[in-house]
């Protein structure tokens, strides 16, 4: 499938969706305290989605099991859970790290964003994991320029993670985004021969969800019996940060950082 180039108006519509997503994550982060359950955080997010007439795109997302789509409008993953954690009765406790991952559609335009937050005091090594993962996303954003190959960016990301003693998860990558949550191209956080075969140049009008997933231990992952939740094989903690980004003629614009649209 071809990469879909967006108009200025489409990018501003996506920014409007991104502003809503940013604000919902901020409310969830403020509410994520010891004793609060992940289901309570989901209920908060759903109220805000309804208030803004937005749709959480994870809800009913199809899987390989017919009739068993994802049961929540967003993903909440704790500690060794890398991605696709299902909200439920689990209560947060001091020392946990929690990934809040929200993709939504507003007026037919999508955005995707994630953050990993600490619950109370966490260990220095876990704090470093969060810091390095956030830095890796910022490194990508700061180096995205028209004409650069994505593999150049992915190589910088992988190097930054590995030089700090961590590993990049390879089973999941970022993606194009626009009128649907998943568009071409695949946006890897690492470089392999397979990824190089799908390499692409950055062009104005591209809209990409860039999302490094970084683990403290080995990069191998397992799937839990629920068919969704992905955990690290060695049960070491994982972090995940994500922004939806638009390429411009001179660089990038982050569409999920909370800034309002410029005008539509």
Image (spheres, rainbow, N blue to C red):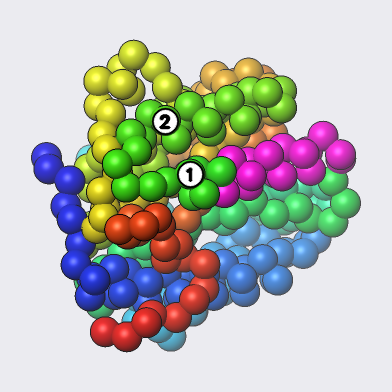
Q: Give the residue at x 69% y 54%.
A: 117
Q: Tell whether label 2 touches label 1 (CB within 8 Å).
A: yes
Q: Is residue 86 visible?
A: no
- The answer to if 57 sits in the magenta stretch is no
Within the image, what quadrant is residue 162 found in?
top right
Image height of 193 relative to 135, above or below: above
Q: How many marks?
A: 2
Q: Quadrant of the C terminus?
A: bottom left
Residue nearest the observer in this picture, 169 or 12? 12
Q: Give the residue at x 58% y 62%.
A: 39
Residue nearest the observer in this picture, 186 or 31? 186
10 Å crowding of disc 2: few (<14), some (14-19), many (20+): some
* Disc marking residue 152: 2
Image position, residue 127 (x, y; %): 79, 43
* Disc marking residue 143: 1
Of callouts 1 and 2, the N-terminal one: 1
Badge 1 element:
helix
């Amino acid at each position: 499938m071809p990469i879909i180039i967006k108009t200025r108006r489409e990018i501003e519509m996506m920014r409007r969706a991104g502003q809503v997503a940013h604000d919902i994550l901020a409310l969830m982060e403020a509410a994520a305290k010891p004793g609060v359950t992940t289901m309570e955080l989901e209920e908060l997010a759903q109220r805000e989605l309804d208030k803004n007439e937005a749709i959480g795109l994870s809800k009913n997302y199809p899987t390989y099991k017919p009739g068993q789509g994802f049961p929540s409008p967003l993903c909440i993953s704790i500690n060794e859970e890398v991605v696709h954690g299902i909200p439920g009765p689990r209560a947060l406790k001091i020392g946990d790290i929690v990934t809040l991952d929200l993709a939504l559609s507003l007026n037919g335009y999508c955005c995707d964003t994630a953050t990993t937050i600490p619950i109370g005091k966490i260990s220095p090594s876990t704090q470093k994991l969060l810091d390095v993962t956030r830095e890796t996303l910022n490194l990508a954003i700061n180096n995205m320029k028209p004409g650069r190959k994505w593999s150049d960016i992915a190589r910088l990301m992988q190097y930054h993670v590995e030089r700090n003693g961590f590993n990049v998860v390879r089973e999941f990558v970022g993606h194009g985004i626009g009128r649907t949550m998943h568009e071409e191209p695949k946006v890897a956080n690492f470089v392999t021969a397979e990824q190089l075969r799908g390499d692409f140049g950055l062009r104005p009008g591209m809209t990409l969800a860039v999302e490094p997933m970084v683990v403290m231990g080995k990069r191998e992952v397992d799937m839990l019996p629920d068919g969704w939740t992905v955990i690290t094989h060695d049960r070491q903690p994982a972090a995940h940060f994500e922004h939806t980004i638009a390429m411009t003629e001179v660089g990038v614009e982050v569409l999920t950082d909370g800034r309002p649209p410029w005008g539509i």
